[in-house]
Amino acid sequence: MMAAQSNLKNMVLCLTAVCFVCAAVLAATYAVTQEPIARTAQHTLQQSLAEVLPQDTEIDVQEQTLLLDGTSYSYYACTQDGRVQGWAIRSVTAGFGGPLTLLVGVRADGTVHAAKVLSHSETPGLGAKCKEDRTFTGQFKSFDPRTRKLAVRKDGGDIDAITASTITSRAYTLAVANAVKVAAALQDGTREEDPQNE
Amino acid sequence: MEYFLIIVSAIFVNNIVLAQFLGICPFLGVSNRLSTAVGMSGAVCFVITLATVVTFLINHYLLVPLNLTFLQTISFILVIAALVQMVEIVLKKAAPALYQALGIFLPLITTNCAVLGVAITVVSKEFAFGGAASHLMNLGEATVYALATSLGYALAMILFAGIREHLAQSDVPKPFKGLPIALITVGIMAMAFLGFSGIV
Amino acid sequence: MSKWSLITKGFIKENPTFVLVLGMCPTLAVTTSAMNGLEMGLATMFVLLLSNIVISLISPIVPDKVHIPGYIVVIATFVTVLQLLMQAFVPAVYEELGLFIPLIVVNCIVLGRAEAFAGSHGAGESALDGIGIGLGFTVSLTLIGIVREALGSGAVFGWKFISGDGILAFIMAPGAFLVLGYLMVLFNKLAKK
């Protein structure tokens, strides 16, 4: 065994060597895993987008952002024959246990196509149902905010809340409503930019 | 208003010990006596706030611009370890009275996962309070969040130590002695804290 | 100590959860289901095994006064390797366990084994020690997960045996403390015999 006295030179040398080797190991791992990580993320994104946007459209996976009422929203557009058919908008609100992040697909005519929970920290068994409870999430499919009100029944709207989870349901509905607003702003934008659209 | 919501949420609703399960080891380890619990809480508040500010700056001005975020875990833990050492040295020289009070707890804090936990949380998690806005925290919010979280730690720790001093004198069935009864007590405390959820 | 007992000691004699009472944070936080407990246990075992081997190899050349920082750097490296691998190949699991993967760095079990065992034993023995303690940790976490999932959602490993919800409190924070407390009581009773 080598003598390892605790003098300053040994300590500095040794720690430097350890850090150097570790950094090298990490850099190598990072280089190897970077591509699979990016691919997995891309794949997950594509899957989520396909779930909330109309079928048979071309989805642009390039993230775009829009500033509305002081909040920055990221969104993805989908097109058919060069015409915008809808947007998938990332919308975050405060749920019961923390932020509730949705990806909301809104068609170009302003109706909701579908919504999907990206992340949440709601109570398991109660608010967490907003992720898979079809009777709740199904209400948003093809919801037209012009003919019906996008709010839970308690607030005078047309959405039935999840039993015992009004706050989560409210947050979910608000996230969808915000996304609809973003889509409306985008719609105005596309009209201005692209007058021959009509 | 937003700061107020952050503070209430971090102290009561998402209490770091009772809802997020961070820093359990020292929470169980040094809560036998009220006086040590107070000392440890003070030291933790100090280190969490300081460490969060420093790691936030490092992440924001060094790791993110250089695209080195994969070094986050390793650099944060080194910063925390170094910081604890430095705080110890500075306190010893500058404020011997404070050092006397906090001294023995400082070395223990490096391995308190609450410190690293808060440091990672503020740079990686999006926050949304009240309205619709959600974003990564800025420095001011991160500092307030860290301070409030550590106050929540202190609250849980001091309450628990108070209960535990009484527990020590009560007649507990043998297999329950020590940690088991302590854990069950924390469980009941956590249940009480559940009552706060949903207020923010 | 025989090689076999190095592996089996983690289950009862030096069980990291019920006897050594180390690594409580992940033990309580991620055991909302049996699967989560199992995954967390295996993730910790990965780090424990590799860091034990490397630390036993480098400990003779690390000066005494700086061995803790040195060990922490080694452990943090393996944790980051684990983070990157999980992100690349099992992103769903990585999302589920979240913050508690990077927090393996400060899991007292890992540094504790480095200090108490790997620093003074050979690589082979340290590897076995890592496996043994890691397995003990995995078994304990899975056990707590099974109990909480069974009571809280009426299911084990995702297989439901009652329809509807269980007692929700058990998958929320209080249930974690209660289940661990009562399991410890049970362990004390059985182990004393």
Image (cartoon, coloured by chain):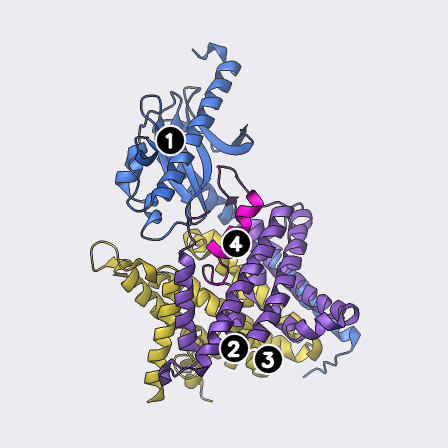
Chain colours: A blue, B purple, C yellow
- For label 4, the residue is B10
Q: Disc 1 marks which amino acid?
A: Leu
> What residue is at 33 percent from the left and 24 percent from the top?
A144
Q: What is the quadrant of the N terminus of chain A in the image?
A: bottom right
Callout 1: few (<14), some (14-19), or many (20+) C-alpha neighbours within 10 Å?
A: many
Q: What whole-number distance in Å separates the C-alpha atoms at marks 1 and 4? A: 37 Å
Q: CA distance from mark 2 to mark 1?
A: 57 Å
Q: Amino acid at mark 4?
A: Ala
Tell me, yes or no, whether the highlighted magenta stretch contains residue B17.
yes
Pointer 3 and pointer 2 on the same chain: no
- SS assignment at label 1: loop
Do the residues indicated by labels 4 and 2 lie within the same chain of the protein?
yes
Q: Position of residue C84 (x, y in %)?
A: 52, 55
Residue C40 visible? The answer is no
Subunit of mark 4?
Answer: B
Residue annotated with mark 2: B32
**Along the viewing direction, whichever of A52 and B152 lies nearer the viewer:** B152
- What residue range appears in magenta? B1-21
Do badges 2 and 1 share one subunit?
Answer: no
Q: Residue at x 48, y 79 (%)?
A: C129
Q: Amino acid at mark 2?
A: Asn
The x and y percentages for residue B63 are: 65, 50
Q: Residues within 10 Å of mark 4 (few under 14, many from 20)?
A: many
**Disc sitting over residue A10 in the figure:** none
Quarter of the figure with residue B173: bottom left
- The percent coordinates of residue B165 (x first, y second) are 49, 77
Please determine if labels 4 and 3 lie on a single subunit.
no
**Circle 3 crowding by C-alpha within 10 Å: few under 14, some 14–19, many from 20:** many
Q: Which residue is under mark 3?
A: C119
